[in-house]
Amino acid sequence: PSLRASAAAPQTTTTTAAPAEQSTAAVRPATNPAAAAAEAGAAPPPPEPEVRAEPTAALRLAPTVTLLRSSTRGRLKLMVEYALRRGSTDNCYLLSARAGAPPTTLIDLPFPTYAQEFLRALRSSAPDLSLLTHVVSTHLGPNRVAVLADVLELAGAEARAGTDRRVRVVLTNPGLKVLEAGFAALGARGAALLAAVEVVVLKSPGGDGVVAQVEVGGGLQLRAVRVPTPRWPVAGCLD
């Protein structure tokens, strides 16, 4: 509407209360789109296409850094901020202590849609996962905990419990709460894995949780910075 029209004086109207039998119908719970279409005699909407993961790509970024990039051609439902519907990606990284050495540190875990392809690429890029000493999560969400459990099982975490080869899971304090709740939901499997690993919570020397130093596999030093966002309150970044 034009500014002139919007500036017009409002008109008063008189409303009449609906009969009781009509008001009960008005507050009836809304139905889903398919049920509403069937009720109206129309054809139900087509189901959303299944989003399938592409093979996870292993890309060498540096002599000691390998990127494991998972992707889909369709948009995942939870990626609502990416409305272009041109696909989604999820990046994880393998770190080695030196060029030619096997990876000892995994940074981040993918969305469960990518789990099967990711684990295949992980086994290919790090054939001996018993050498994996650290799993660092910069943004652990509830739906990624199951992928973490898969990685820990492949790395033989339970068999290494109580030894100097114990797997260390590095995350933020909010991420710890997600980890504990997620492993609790996995029942006995989650309880066994949580007891087997050593959890390292990132804390700054000043106690404010903003910046922390963490040593990972092979003596590598990483600097962790918490960067919480409305979507990822548990997020952090590393350098």
Image: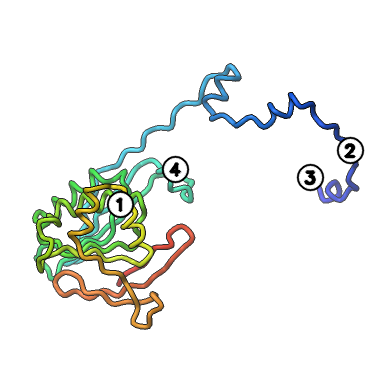
Residue tagged 1: 184
Query: How many neighbours does mark 1 have within 10 angstroms: few (below 14), some (14-19), or many (20 or more)?
Result: some
Kind of residue indicated by mark 3: Pro
User: From this viewpoint, which residue is outermost toward the top?
Assistant: 41
Mark 4 lies on residue: 85
User: Toward which corner of the image does residue 181 lie, by quadrant?
Assistant: bottom left
Give the crowd class for mark 3: few <14, some 14-19, many >=20 residues within 10 Å: few
Q: Nearer the viewer, residue 69 or 185?
A: 185
Position in image of residue 74 (x %, y %): 39, 40
Indicate which disc residue 45 carries: none
Under mark 1, the amino acid is Ala
Name the residue rendered at 58%, 19% in the picture: 39
Give, as a three-letter code, the residue at label 2: Thr
Instruction: Indicate which disc residue 1 carries.
Output: 3
Question: Which of pointers 1 and 2 lies earlier in the amino acid sequence?
Answer: 2
Which is closer to the viewer, label 1 or label 4? Answer: 1
- Examine the image and state in which quarter residue 14 appears: top right
Q: Nearer the viewer, residue 4 or 103?
A: 103
Q: Which residue was labeled with disc 2?
A: 13
Front of the two marks 2 and 3: 2
Q: Is residue 63 visible?
A: no
Q: CA distance from mark 4 to mark 3?
A: 32 Å
Q: Residue at x 80, y 29 (%)?
A: 18
User: Mark 4 or mark 1, which is nearer the start of the sequence?
Assistant: 4
Q: CA distance from mark 1 to mark 2?
A: 58 Å
Front-lying residue, 76 or 178: 178
Among the two numbered marks 1 and 3 on one chain, the one whose residue lies closer to the N terminus: 3
Disc 4 crowd rating (10 Å Cα; few below 14, some 14-19, many 20+) is few
> Quadrant location of residue 140?
bottom left
Residue at 35% over, 78% down: 204
